[in-house]
Image (cartoon, rainbow, N blue to C red):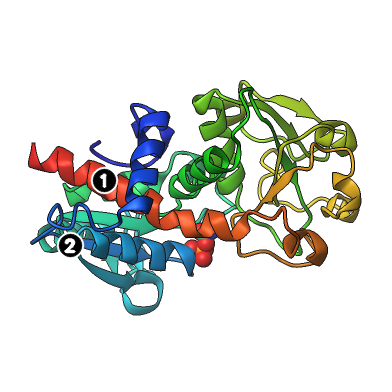
Amino acid sequence: MKNFISVNDVASIDALVQKAIAYKAAPHKDKKLGADKRVGLLFLNPSMRTRLSTQIAAQNLGMESIVFNMDKDGWKLEFEDGAIMNGTSVEHIKDAAPIFGAYFDLLCIRTFPSLVNKQDDYNEVLVNQIIKYSGIPVISLESATLHPLQSFADVISITESFKEQRKPKIVLTWAPHIKPIPQCVANSFAQWINAWGHADFVITHPEGYELDTQFTEGAAIEHDQATALKDADFVYVKNWSSFTDYGKVLPDNEHWMLTTGHLKDTNNAKVMHCLPVRRNVELSDEVLDGPNSLVNLQAANRVWAAQTVLAEILTTQSN
Ligand code: CP
């Protein structure tokens, strides 16, 4: 594995999941793999789980990790080619990224979309510039359109939680929120579940919240939430802002908040959310605090997802 930006960087999801489960059983078995290697964790946005799990993962592999909050501690970056930098931007990514390449063996970066410039967001301008100019392997800690380490942890969690000899029914359901939220988690989850291929996969959302079909192709789309949820084994709850009316929040969908009532016709479904969650806006307390919630498992599995991806890239580097 050279970079980890999307599921397209993964040769076999099943093999990667088994490697992660092996790390969970023996976290320090490859303690020497990352010896004398340094990973930079660059954040342009807040994070708790991604930051801590990736640092723990690096430590488990014997790597040094340095966190740099670029949005707070760094110079304001310019990403536009040919920009005349007479405004607020102080440093061009062309100048900053090679420095990261000189300081680190591997780079992890978290960015969010603008939710204003759809073309730049969906072209992943920022991550692609980092890959182009740093010259070292890059792992996405969430980009403008995808959150692959989260999705990998989600597939690990589903694999661990479902032992029946049939395909699970997995439903991704839109949930309300108070402000515009990126489509990243939903795009990425859809992309991974479709590529994984071991589930009957349904996406449900109000009209106007259609996701980019490059990620959803293969899933059934159902606008009636109750119909979609029937017989579900897993319900993944997530808000996203409109992709078509880009970055907008559409009115009058509060009833999409997932409660125990919504789950009554499921197959005793496990409930998933990537966290952080707006309690009693996206999901009710009783669901989140109930026995079928997988949210803590998902967050815990972020460590093994990150450790597996770091190890894959370190192994590629050393060959
Ligand atoms: N799920 C997730 O990425 O959490 P953080 O934003 O806290 O990293």
Q: Which quadrant does the N terminus fall into?
A: top left
Q: Which quadrant does the C terminus fall into?
A: top left
Q: Indicate the position of residue 8 as horizontal and vertical percent values.
A: 39, 30
Q: Indicate the position of residue 262 as horizontal and vertical percent values.
A: 88, 47
- The answer to whether one can see residue 136 in this image is yes
Corner quadrant of residue 22: top left
Residue labelled 1 has its Cβ within 8 Å of some atom of ligand 1: no
- In this rendering, the answer to whether 197 lies above or below 281 is above
Residue kind at label 1, given as amino acid type: Ile
Corner quadrant of residue 302: bottom left
For the point 74% across and 65% down, the residue is: 289
Q: Few, some or many C-alpha atoms within 10 Å of disc 2 (few <14, some 14-19, many ≥20)? A: some
Which of 97/220 is in front?
220
Asked if labels 2 and 1 touch by Cβ distance under 8 angstroms, the answer is no
- Per the rendering, the mark at residue 62 is 2
For the point 66% across and 45% down, the residue is: 246
Numbered marks: total? 2
Choose the circle earlier in sequence order: 1 or 2: 2
Lateral position of residue 58 relative to residue 297, left or right: left
Which of 285/243 is in front?
285
Q: Few, some or many C-alpha atoms within 10 Å of disc 1 (few <14, some 14-19, many ≥20)? A: some
For the point 86% across and 53% down, the residue is: 260
Assign a secondary structure to mark 2.
loop
* Residue annotated with mark 1: 131
Q: Indicate the position of residue 314 as horizontal and vertical percent values.
A: 17, 46
- Residue farthest bottom in this picture: 73
Lateral position of residue 304 relative to residue 214, left or right: left
Residue kind at label 2, given as amino acid type: Gly
Q: Indicate the position of residue 40 as horizontal and vertical percent values.
A: 24, 63
